[in-house]
Amino acid sequence: MVSRIFFWLVCVSVVTTFVQAQPVGLGFYDNLSELPCVYSNVESYYLSSYDRTGGNDDGFRGTYSQLYVDEAGEHIIFEEDGPGCVYNFWFTGTGRDLHWGKLKFYFDGEKKPRIECQAKEFFGGQYRPFVYPLVTHSFISSGGFSCSAPIPFAKKLKISTEKTCGFYNVYYQLYRNVKVESWRKGQNYSGLINLFQRCSSNPKAITEKIEVVSKPIVLGTAGRGGRPETNLLSVDQGGTIQYIRINPLYAPNKYSLNHIHLRISYDRESAPSIDVPIGPFFGSGLGEADVRSLFVGMSTSGTYYCYFPMPFRKAIRISLQNRSHDAGGEFFCEIGYTKTFMPAKDGGVTGYFGARYNKAWPITEKSDYKLFDYRGRGAVVGQVMTVEPVKPDRKRWWEGDMRIYIDGEKKPRFHGTGHEDEYQGGWSTFWLTNPYSLPLFGQPKTEGLIDVFGQVNGSTTAYRFWPGKIHFKNSILISTEHGNHNDTPANYSSLVYYYYVRE
């Protein structure tokens, strides 16, 4: 709290000098080619109904389902001074609809809300301009009611619910020395709707000529001779990878996709900066699934894609390596790149793309599973997490809360309410039995589902992307409980996408 207050005091102390910062709101999606830019004047936050006592009353009783109740009887769930932007907010209910009444948004100290409607109308796409796929209800995101339409605010934003809402979370950003225009009626989201609807195509606007290298490859079997590796691309000059597409020309299983690694080396480094299994990298740790997100995806009958821009100053080498004793199989691969290293924007610095894989099979310690523990400067873009129960009766691992610590803060900046909530679903049995894949979040595959005394247990893989990126100056730790109070052993694996600054 102290750091946030200091951040805001600096914000309001400078009222006339504005510097270039990461594009805000719709501007972020208009400039996805600038995704590698890392800025120092943006901070990300996460507000949720998690149990402040450390228990599991994350919304069941409504104890922490509001910041306070105002004099008009409205339940205030969000209140921040700007400039800032809410990128995503989520609720869950006990059935098809939310039964807590009206949702209201008050901007810049105004007494009358600019946004006011019944919750079920809002998430049902009946309150324009908030329509699908910007908003989703529980039959789309499997138990969750989510809004991914960015809502910027210049001076202040207050959000209220008519009655106690139960479980909720809000992901938002605050900015320093940035001029932000507040959301207004008639806000045009048509460009973002179009972007979300054409997932699997390149979301970046690229004016420079794209050089394309395509080739079929066959990976050998790992054995006494080592780990067979096949080069996909080698470039000995600066540039930016714009996309990677691979198409398996065989039927890969889960084991294969977790033992064939994508390896990327920048600027003639001796060891690759990226060395990760291709299944999680393209969105699924449980083998092939239909993943159709904005940045990565895969198909059970076609191409896997990655559209993260990957700048390199001097050179780049991209390869696939087979680490299994099964035949690696045949692939058709295509990589597109431009010959210009993306220049830094004013107030920012160009980062290198990274992907970090981790696993604990199983995690049994009475401590959080760590998805990502990094020292340095950069920004996290998203994550993929896979959980496989050690035994059918060892359930409720999903009660574990996500926690993200930034720049050595003792208290997590992000504190969630459980796995299904953080990936925008809700209610474990409904969530596990209804996979989904959406532009910024999804649970594309589950397997081994079994009813354990009226509650379904099984394996899942889920992903989430953070618009605007989660910036950090010195360090970041992304972790999650496994079960309430880390009391449930399970096999966890994860992959985190990020950009990092080479000092």
Image (tube, rainbow, N blue to C red):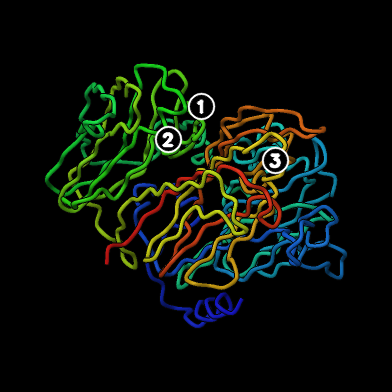
Residue 126 can be seen in this image: no
- Please state which of residues 193 and 404 is positioned toward the viewer in this rendering: 404
- Please state which of residues 499 and 327 is positioned toward the viewer in this rendering: 327
Mark 3 and mark 1 lie on one chain; the one further toward the N terminus is 1
Cα gap from disc 3 to disc 2, whole angstroms: 28 Å
Q: Residues within 10 Å of mark 1 (few under 14, many from 20)?
A: many
Q: Residues within 10 Å of mark 3 (few under 14, many from 20)?
A: some
**Discs 3/1, front:** 3
- Please state which of residues 399 and 390 is positioned toward the viewer in this rendering: 390
Residue 396 lies in quadrant: top right
The amino acid sitting under disc 3 is Arg
- In the rendered view, tell whether residue 455 sits above or below residue 376: above
The amino acid sitting under disc 2 is Phe
Mark 3 and mark 2 lie on one chain; the one further toward the N terminus is 2
**Discs 3/2, front:** 3
- Please state which of residues 44 and 82 is positioned toward the viewer in this rendering: 44
Q: Where the N terminus falls, by quadrant?
A: bottom right
The amino acid sitting under disc 1 is Ala
Mark 1 and mark 2 lie on one chain; the one further toward the N terminus is 2
User: Residue 473: horizontal and vertical position, in percent?
Assistant: 41, 69
Task: Write the residue at 69% across / 34% down.
Answer: 392
Would you name the residue on which mark 2 appears? 282
User: Residue 453: horizontal and vertical position, in percent?
Assistant: 82, 33
Would you name the residue on which mark 1 appears? 289
Q: Is mark 3 on a helix, strand or loop?
A: loop
